[in-house]
Image: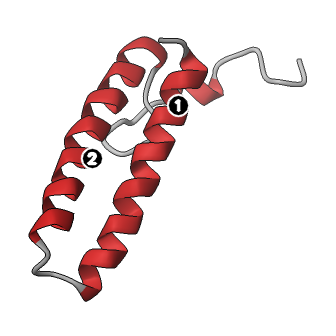
C-alpha cells in the first residue's frame, strides 16, 4: 500500500476509535461497542506499524530523533 493510503487508513481508524471512546463514556457497559473498539484498535496498531516500517514514525512518542535538524532545510 502506498503512503497516502496507509496514512488515510491510520487516520480513519484513529477517528473511529475516538468516536467509539466518546460513545463508551456514556455507554460503558455496551459489549458490542467495546468489541468494535477493540477490533479497531488492533487494526489501527497493525496499520500504524506497517506505515512506520515503511515511512518512519507518525509521532514523537517513544522516539527521540534529531532528523529535523539535518540539512537540507526546506528553504535551502
- For the C terminus, give its image quadrant: top right
For the residues marked 1 and 2, what is the alpha-carbon distance in whole angstroms?
Answer: 15 Å
Residue at x 17% of width, y 52% of height: 38
* Mark 1 surroundings within 10 Å by alpha-carbon count, few (fewer than 14), some (14 through 19), many (20 or more): some
Element at label 2: helix
Q: Position of residue 52 (x, y in %)?
A: 39, 23
Q: Is tag 1's residue or tag 2's residue first in the polypeptide sequence?
A: 1
- 45 is higher (above) or lower (below) than 47: below
Residue, disc 1: 7
Q: Position of residue 44 (x, y in %)?
A: 31, 39
Q: Residue furthest right?
A: 75
- Depth check: 64 or 29 in front? 29
Residue, disc 2: 40
Image position of 67 (left or right of 17) = right
Residue at x 36% of width, y 76% of height: 22
Q: Residue furthest bottom?
A: 26
Image position of 18 (left or right of 4) = left
Whether tag 1 and tag 2 are in contact, CB under 8 A, the answer is no
Residue at x 48% of width, y 25% of height: 6
Q: Which mark is residue 35?
A: none
- 33 is higher (above) or lower (below) than 54: below
1 or 2: mark nearer the eye: 2
**Which picture quadrant has residue 25?**
bottom left
Residue at x 39% of width, y 63% of height: 18
Image position of 24 (left or right of 13) = left
Q: How is the image coloured?
A: secondary structure
Amino acid at each position: 500500500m502506498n503512503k497516502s493510503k496507509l496514512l488515510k487508513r491510520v487516520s480513519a481508524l484513529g477517528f473511529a476509535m475516538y468516536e467509539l471512546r466518546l460513545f463508551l463514556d456514556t455507554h460503558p457497559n455496551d459489549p458490542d461497542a467495546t468489541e468494535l473498539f477493540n477490533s479497531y484498535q488492533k487494526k489501527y496498531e497493525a496499520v500504524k506499524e506497517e506505515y512506520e516500517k515503511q515511512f518512519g514514525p507518525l509521532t514523537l512518542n517513544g522516539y527521540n530523533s534529531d532528523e529535523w535538524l539535518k540539512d537540507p532545510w526546506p528553504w535551502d
